[in-house]
Amino acid sequence: MLTILFCGENNQQNSNDRSASIFQSCISETKLSGDALKGFRSMSIPKTQAEKCMMGCLMRKVNVINKGKFSVEEATKVAQKYYGNNETLMKKAKDLIDVCAKKAQSTTEECALAGIVTTCIVEEAQKAGLTGGPGSRSKRTVSPKFRHSIV
């Protein structure tokens, strides 16, 4: 859901601008650079501490992580952007979010939390057969608008 998830604006330019701004802010905050940044941009599940912290920052900036906790409410809003009024897909997404929320209770440390949530979302989305949104491939899926702004 990653990331994500990032923008709610309907205006494509505003959305791209906001996504790029959030991404740049998190690069500055986490000091992600070089090979770590290249690995993060490959859109795989974050494996290194630096990648997890970058994902944690991104999730915090869009309130999916809030005060050291995974926000079911904000994650559901993200799912709604992907799946809209498709009740079947939204039910699967809500079930996935609930599973991941339980797994996310094991930590409040942002980087670790982001790693747990991201891995869970991708794995559960694959199990649920969710496509066209988070977890639709073996790698982390990012909104095409966001992907365009960072690639």
Image (cartoon, grey):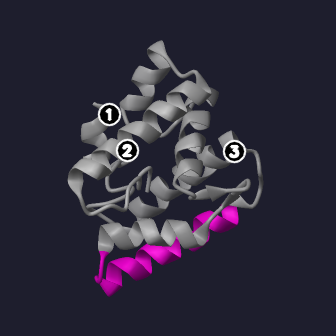
Location of residue 118 in the rendering, given as x and y in whole percent from the top left corner: 53, 50
Q: Nearer the viewer, residue 149 or 9?
A: 9
Give the total of numbered labels: 3
Element type where label 1 sits in the image: helix
Three-letter code, disc 3: Glu
Element type where label 3 sits in the image: helix
Three-letter code, disc 1: Ile
Location of residue 144 in the rendering, given as x and y in whole percent from the top left corner: 25, 48
Residue 69, placed above or below residue 22: below
Q: Quadrant of the C terminus?
A: top left
Dot 1 and dot 3 residues touching (CB under 8 Å)? no
Instruction: Point out the frontmost of discs 2 and 3.
Output: 2
State the mark number for residue 150: 1
| 92 in the magenta segment | yes
State the mark number for residue 110: 3
| Magenta stretch secondary structure, dominant | helix
Q: Residue at x 75, y 45 (%)?
A: 109
